Image (cartoon, rainbow, N blue to C red):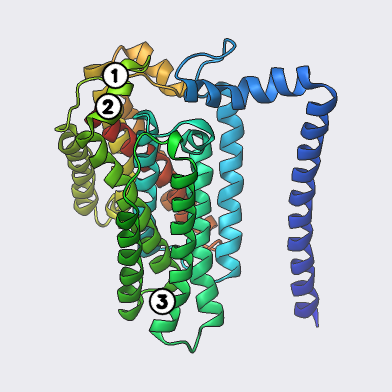
């Protein structure tokens, strides 16, 4: 009887916490909305626009707008950090509710989607988008876009698992194909209706072929016994990555796309295709060194350095750090984030980013895998979800910077 009462109290407590969070978000949203209507100068002009939306507009236009520059500021950095923490907690709740294992396989299945985020952001730098479409590919809005694609793919896998327990592989593939058709339809609608807002449009058959590749890949993966959610996320990630990578190839091959960019205020620097090899090799070499240290200290806490998820974590941030270092020191690019800008100015070189990334990831690994290892054991999946988010924050911007340097934009 006591255990029954305790279980029901726990359920009530969890529901109550959810209601508190939802209520808090509704109250904050309502206050901001009403404030923007009644006191626009205070709530919109001097708060939301100044610190959040203004930098996005400035990024779109490629110049300061109303004295507001693109990039992040101290306030937006803190707010986005809080929102990220809430997203991590939400993902933990959903994974626990639907019994999804956030292991190395799951994280690896998300890597193509993370890469897509970086490539798509670089395409925005290359002037692919214009008009309202462009906003979807500017930080932080692009994080919402990638998150929406991720959620759609994961939800499709979970729906198939929930309702298709006795379905054949072919029937499960057909359901996944519906998601691909929706994504393809949205893509084709946007490209045709907003043709003037795009510097280049892939031939429709190319995107359709990539959709077929994603469907076939999903069929093969689940035929081999891969879990449905990771298979769905990986296949969708490959689809959007192939589409975005094709635009990169098109940019290099189409002078008609490059010339308007050269004539604009943004300009076009010399491409450095060798950085597609050099920067990943730097990140790989540093990651391999940490793997060797972890293997050497196999009987100590250093073994955490050689854990596969942690190696991906290190590589993603070394990629970001190496791209920042070479982009700023060698090619004259700039930094948008508050802390990195301060450190680069203080040390006089962006090479400090490699050390900063090392210390940052070491701190995360030490906290999650060593210092709070026992305390986190009851919260299954939470450590890897935290790493999942940090990998995304390193790999996507790092990929964007590598592609941007390679294209010279």
Residue 367 in view in this figure: no
Q: Nearer the viewer's eye, disc 3 or disc 2?
A: 2
Few, some or many residues within 10 Å of mark 3 (<14, 14–19, 20+): many
Seen from the viewer's position, the closer of residues 248 and 318 is: 248
Q: Gap in Å between the C-alphas at discs 2 and 1?
A: 6 Å
The residue beneath circle 1 is 262
Which sits in the foreground, 165 or 189? 189
Quadrant for the N terminus, please. bottom right
Rendering coords of residue 125 (x, y %): 37, 29
Q: Secondary structure at mark 1?
A: helix
Classify residue 95 by image quadrant: bottom right
Q: Which residue is more in the foreground, 353 or 189?
A: 189
Is any atom of residue 395 visible in this view? yes
Mark carried by residue 258: 2
Picture residue at 78% right of the left edge, 21% below the top: 40
* CA gap, disc 1 and disc 3: 45 Å
Mark 3 to mark 2 CA distance (whole Å): 40 Å
* Left or right side of 218 for 158: right
Label drawn at residue 173 = 3
Residue 102, by quadrant, is bottom left
Q: Is residue 381 above or below residue 33?
A: below
Per the image, label 2 sits on a secondary structure element best described as helix
């Amino acid at each position: 009887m006591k255990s029954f009462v305790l279980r029901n109290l726990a359920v009530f407590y969890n529901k109550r916490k959810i209601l508190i969070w939802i209520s808090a978000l509704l109250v904050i949203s309502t206050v901001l909305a009403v404030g923007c209507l009644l006191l626009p100068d205070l709530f919109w002009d001097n708060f939301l626009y100044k610190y959040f939306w203004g930098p996005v507009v400035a990024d779109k236009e490629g110049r300061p707008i109303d004295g507001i520059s693109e990039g992040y500021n101290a306030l937006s950095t803190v707010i986005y950090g809080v929102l990220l923490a809430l997203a991590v907690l939400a993902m933990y709740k959903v994974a626990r509710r639907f019994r999804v294992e956030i292991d190395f396989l799951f994280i690896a299945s998300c890597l193509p989607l993370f890469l897509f985020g970086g490539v798509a952001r670089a395409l925005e730098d290359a002037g692919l988008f214009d008009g309202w479409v462009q906003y979807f590919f500017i930080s932080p809005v692009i994080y919402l876009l990638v998150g929406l694609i991720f959620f759609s793919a994961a939800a499709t896998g979970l729906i198939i698992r929930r309702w298709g327990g006795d379905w054949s592989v072919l029937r499960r593939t057909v359901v996944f194909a519906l998601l691909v058709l929706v994504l393809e339809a949205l893509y084709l609608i946007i490209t045709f209706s907003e043709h003037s807002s795009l510097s280049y449009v892939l031939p429709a058959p190319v995107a359709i072929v990539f959709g077929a590749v994603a469907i076939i890949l999903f069929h093969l993966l689940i035929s081999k016994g891969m879990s449905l959610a990771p298979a769905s996320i990986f296949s969708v990630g490959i689809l959007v990555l192939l589409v975005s990578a094709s635009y990169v190839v098109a940019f290099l091959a189409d002078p008609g796309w490059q010339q308007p960019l050269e004539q604009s205020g943004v300009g076009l620097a010399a491409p450095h295709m060798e950085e597609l090899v050099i920067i990943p090799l730097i990140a790989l070499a540093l990651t391999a060194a940490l793997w060797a240290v972890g293997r050497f200290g196999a009987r100590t806490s250093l073994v955490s350095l050689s854990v596969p998820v942690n190696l991906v974590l290190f590589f993603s941030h070394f990629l970001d750090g190496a791209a920042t270092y070479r982009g700023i020191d060698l090619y004259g690019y700039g930094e948008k984030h508050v802390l990195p800008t301060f450190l680069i100015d203080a040390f006089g070189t962006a090479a400090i980013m490699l050390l900063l990334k090392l210390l940052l990831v070491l701190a995360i690994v030490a906290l999650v895998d060593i210092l709070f290892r026992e305390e986190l054991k009851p919260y299954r999946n939470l450590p890897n979800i935290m790493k999942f988010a940090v990998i995304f924050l390193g790999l996507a911007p790092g990929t964007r910077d590598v592609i941007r340097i390679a294209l010279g934009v």
